[in-house]
Image: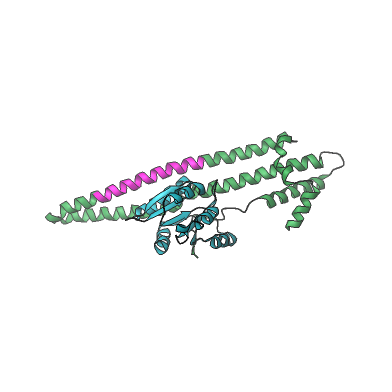
């Protein structure tokens, strides 16, 4: 059975590129347009991995990360941040909020799949 | 400049968060307002053009990707049909077709990285637009308070006022969300 990944980004083109890459590698992908949409979808089912942007309307990626970590079934699910942000203080915030890893955009399909393969359960 | 110095500047100019954010209903200089609105409009135009281009490119990308997949499957099917006869020229042609399919696939993977430029551009434009907005409000506020058009003011006062407006704008602006200078793949870090 294919593992399911929740891909969160307010940019339609990024969502499409992420989906293209992950579906091509055999993963099932569900897309969310912002943190709130992702949080609603995550409450309905448990994903094997969450890949999220940071700068988004309604609920940003860091808030989504904090909210997901409060839900018992998401305490050990890998959550990767995929963002344009590369400042160390932002990474530190992500790390302390429970992020599994940090990928700076633009991503390379090979690297993305490599990281996901390493951390997905 | 330290945060304390910024705060002092704002106090000297009688600028508070409220006065800056609520200044829109008391525009002193309509020419400046129009000028900044035009810049924001131009940035919006760039954003729309880029977004439309990205949307079209993604459609092209998906179409090429589907064609490549169909092409690959067709070559595989023809290969199966050709193998029993052992026709070497046909097998060689199919091998070349497979190499072309592999190259297209490789280029498509590279395009996945390049096609993310739209997101980076949109974020940079939003950041710049926000800075212009804040700068406009701060300038309008300074304009009302300093009345630099009065005869007893000189160019130094004008220069100081503009410098203060820039300093306040910097202090109000969020950190630049995109520092990438090229479309190379970004770094990866596992915690």
Identity of the residue furthest to the bottom in this view: B191
- What predominant SS class does the magenta segment belong to? helix
Name the residue at 78% across, 53% down.
Answer: B8
The region drawn magenta spans B49-73
Residue situated in front as seen by the camera: B155 or A91:
A91
Where is residue B107? Give x, y as percent: 38, 53
Q: Is residue B55 magenta?
A: yes
| Viewer-nearest residue: B180 or A8 | A8
Of B113 and A22, the residue lying toward us: A22
Give the colour in which the image draws chain B.
Answer: green
Residue B167 location (% of width, % of height):
72, 51
Question: Which chain is the one coloured cyan?
Answer: A
| Residue B5 inside the magenta-drawn segment | no
- Horizontally, is B165 left or right of A7 in the view? right
> Relative to B32, is A1 on the left or the right?
left
**Which picture quadrant has residue B2?**
bottom right
Residue occupying image coordinates x 30% and y 52%: B101
Residue B107 visible? The answer is no
């Amino acid at each position: 059975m294919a593992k399911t990944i929740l891909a969160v980004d307010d940019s339609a083109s990024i969502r499409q590129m992420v989906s293209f890459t992950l579906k091509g590698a055999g993963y099932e992908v569900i897309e969310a347009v912002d943190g709130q949409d992702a949080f609603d979808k995550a409450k309905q089912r448990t994903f094997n991995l969450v890949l999220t942007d940071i700068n988004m309307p309604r609920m940003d990626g860091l808030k989504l990360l904090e909210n997901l970590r409060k839900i018992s079934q998401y305490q050990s699910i890998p959550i990767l941040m995929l963002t344009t942000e590369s400042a160390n203080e932002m990474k530190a915030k992500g790390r302390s909020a429970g992020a599994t890893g940090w990928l700076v955009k633009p991503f390379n399909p090979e690297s993305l799949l490599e990281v996901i393969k390493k951390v997905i359960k | 400049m330290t945060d304390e110095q910024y705060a002092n500047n704002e106090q000297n100019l009688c600028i508070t968060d409220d006065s800056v954010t609520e200044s829109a209903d008391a525009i002193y200089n309509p020419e400046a307002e129009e000028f900044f609105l035009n810049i924001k409009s131009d940035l919006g135009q760039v954003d729309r053009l880029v977004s439309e281009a990205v949307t079209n490119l993604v459609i092209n990308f998906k179409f090429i990707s589907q064609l490549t997949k169909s092409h690959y499957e067709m070559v595989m099917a023809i290969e199966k049909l050709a193998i029993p006869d052992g026709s070497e020229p046909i097998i060689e042609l199919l091998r070349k077709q497979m190499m072309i399919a592999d190259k297209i696939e490789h280029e498509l993977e590279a395009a996945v990285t390049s096609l993310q430029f739209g997101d980076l551009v949109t974020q940079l434009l939003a950041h710049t637009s926000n800075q212009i907005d804040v700068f406009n409000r701060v300038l309008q506020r300074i304009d009302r308070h300093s009345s630099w058009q009065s005869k007893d003011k000189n160019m130094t006062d004008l220069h100081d006022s503009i410098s203060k407006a820039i300093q306040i704008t910097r202090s109000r602006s969020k950190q630049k969300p995109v520092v990438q200078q090229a479309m190379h793949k970004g770094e990866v870090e596992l915690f």
